[in-house]
Image (tube, grey):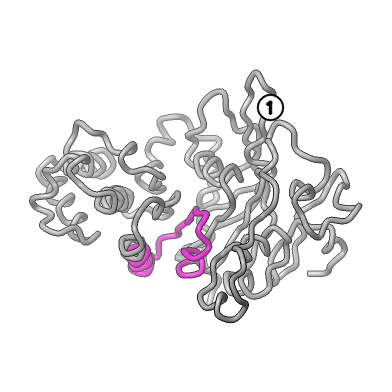
């Protein structure tokens, strides 16, 4: 079996925000790839750089933010070298994104059908009638009941789960090769979360679409992803296959995240103990600590964690980790 083709390759990406308070390095030397038919999970606390990484890929960073340097290769083509018009042809067509809050991403003054059909008209050159018919088909595909009626609804007439499915329908309308899903299950009840996850899993299997699933919910990642990247304070601190990450986490931050997950039956086995928490707060991006960014919060910290440069270490099939404990480890 031949290895899956690389859809996206990010190399040494730096994204910064220059404000009166100083320069915040929101994405700091981030390198990873996404392969065809793969679901890559990206996890971390709020402020870890997950969403800014996604917006950088889409080239939607606006002042005072800017992509300082790095390569964003899509099928070997550097998106950083494209003009604004060329990038518009890529967005929504070959690369689509589901944003965090569908109510603010959908236009309140246009019907759902009009917003979906616009994708077909712009990127596929269909007539208004053909585009409207395709919009109904997409609503049916994302399991919205009575799609021929709901296509005439406005966003406020739909529930949060329905609006999220509309966003997925829009994102998949042109069969993109890469789908970026930024917190697609946030603020949805458990039943709707499960339906959205199942829908994305089915669509990935049907179209072999590469998916970047950005979330703070490790339970979602365990269910849907094949590979996981853990981010903290703008940096990748660990990358591994999903089973390996959950069974043998290497970075202290990853272990802390896993310990913070409520586990069924733990109270019965261990008695009434408080849920584990990660002490301290994520450091401000304007004033990052020397050495490891997690050092001030790390229960396993040692003096060499404050070294000026701690690189991301490649451990071969065991993944990558940014921690002094693995300095000198062989792949």
For mark 1, what is the residue? 23
Q: In screen coordinates, is 305 left or right of 45? A: right
Q: Which residues are magenta?
A: 197-224
Q: In screen coordinates, is 100 left or right of 281? A: left
* Outermost residue, right side: 303
Give the quadrant of the C terminus: bottom right
Q: Is residue 212 magenta?
A: yes
176 over 17 or under it: above or below: below
Q: Is residue 116 magenta?
A: no
Residue drawn 41% across the image and 53% down it: 179
* Outermost residue, bottom side: 269
Q: Secondary structure at mark 1?
A: strand
Badge count: 1
Relative image position of residue 247 (x, y in whole percent): 64, 75
- Residue 72 in sight here: no
Q: In screen coordinates, is 107 left or right of 56? A: left
163 over 35 or under it: above or below: above
Quadrant position of residue 156: top left
Q: Nearer the viewer, residue 262 or 173?
A: 262
Q: Main SS of the magenta segment? A: helix
């Amino acid at each position: 079996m031949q290895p899956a083709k690389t859809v996206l390759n990010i190399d040494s990406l730096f994204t910064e925000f220059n404000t009166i308070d100083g320069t915040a390095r929101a994405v700091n030397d981030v390198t990873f790839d996404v392969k065809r038919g793969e679901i890559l999970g990206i996890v971390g606390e709020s402020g870890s750089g997950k969403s800014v990484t996604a917006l950088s890929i889409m080239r939607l960073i606006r002042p005072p933010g800017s992509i300082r340097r790095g390569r964003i290769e899509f099928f070997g083509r550097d998106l950083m070298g494209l003009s604004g018009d060329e990038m518009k042809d890529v967005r929504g067509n070959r690369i689509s994104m589901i944003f965090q809050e569908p109510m603010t991403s959908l236009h309140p003054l246009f019907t759902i059908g009009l917003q979906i059909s616009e994708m077909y008209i712009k990127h596929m050159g269909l007539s208004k009638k053909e585009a409207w018919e395709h919009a109904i088909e997409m609503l049916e595909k994302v399991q919205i009941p009575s799609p021929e009626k709901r296509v005439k609804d406005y966003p406020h007439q739909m529930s949060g789960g329905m609006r999220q499915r509309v966003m997925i329908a829009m994102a998949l309308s042109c069969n993109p090769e890469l789908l970026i899903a930024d917190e697609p299950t946030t603020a949805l009840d458990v039943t709707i979360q499960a339906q959205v996850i199942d829908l994305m899993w089915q669509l990935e299997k049907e179209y072999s679409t590469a998916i970047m699933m950005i979330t703070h919910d490790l339970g979602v990642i365990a269910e849907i992803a094949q590979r996981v990247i853990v981010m903290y304070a703008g940096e990748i601190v660990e990358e591994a296959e999903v089973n390996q990450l959950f069974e043998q986490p290497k970075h202290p931050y990853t272990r802390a995240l896993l310990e913070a997950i409520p586990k069924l039956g733990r109270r019965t086995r261990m008695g009434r103990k408080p849920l584990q928490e990660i002490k301290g707060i994520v450091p401000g991006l304007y004033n990052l600590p020397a050495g490891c960014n997690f050092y001030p919060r790390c229960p396993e910290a040692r003096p060499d964690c404050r070294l000026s440069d701690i690189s991301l270490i490649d451990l071969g099939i065991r993944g990558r980790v940014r921690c002094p404990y693995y300095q000198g480890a062989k792949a």
